[in-house]
Amino acid sequence: MKPSHIEHIGIAVKNLDETIKYYEQVLGLTCYNIEEVKDQKVKTAFFKVGDTKIELLESTDPEGPIGKFIEKKGEGIHHMAFAVQNIEEKLKKAEENGVKLIDKQPRKGAEGLDIAFLHPKSTFGVLTELCEDKSKS
Ligand code: ZN
């Protein structure tokens, strides 16, 4: 698959505003984008750390994926996202290698990226996202 870098790390949080304060005041990072992703029932906030971003995820609905995650496991790291090229091809390859896919086809995620998730049962417990910035390729 050869990802070029870790595109972002997704962190599930209960309160976006309080968490943003921590990342800005303690870590000294700057939140450069806040965006709601309606079909995922989340509000996201982004910070850059080198080539990698931190994506904070606050649920807008207790029945959404992040709402359920927090209820089960509490706040914390939710997923890791790798930047890849030709995401459709990479998904097909992963499936051929026996990896269970959550998304068989890429869909639009935050920041206009094409994204797809691999099932954590196939990735040794880490919910893994592939993403491609098609505006750059
Ligand atoms: Zn993500």
Image (spheres, helix red, strand yellow):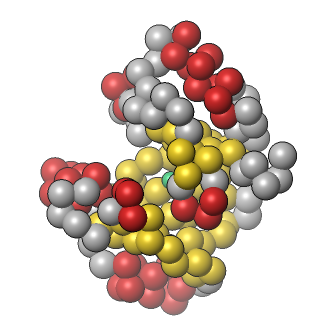
Q: Residue at x 40, y 32 (%)?
A: 102
The image quadrant that residue 125 belongs to is top left
Whether residue 58 sits left or right of residue 96 in the image: it is left
In depth, the one of 31 and 88 nearer the eye is 88
Residue 101 visible in the picture: yes
Vertical placement of residue 69 versus 35, above or below: above
Could you tell me residue 94's position as x and y percent? 56, 19
On screen, residue 12 versus residue 1, left or right, reads left
Across and down, in percent, residue 91 comes to 58, 26
* Residue at 44% across, 26% down: 101
85 versus 78 height, above or below: above
Answer left or right for 68 relative to 88. Answer: left
Q: Quadrant of the N terminus?
A: top right
Provide residue 130's location: percent of width, then percent of height.
58, 39
Identify the residue shown where x is 25% and y is 57%. 64
Q: Residue at x 55, y 61 (%)?
A: 110
Question: From the viewer's perspective, is residue 24 above or below residue 105?
Answer: below
Can the viewer see residue 56 in this picture?
no
Give the quadrant of residue 11: bottom left
Snapshot quadrant of residue 28: bottom right
Front residue of this view, candidates 42 and 128: 42
Number of callouts in the render? 0
- Above or below for 6 versus 95: below
- Outermost residue, right direction? 137
Residue 20's x, y, as percent?
45, 82
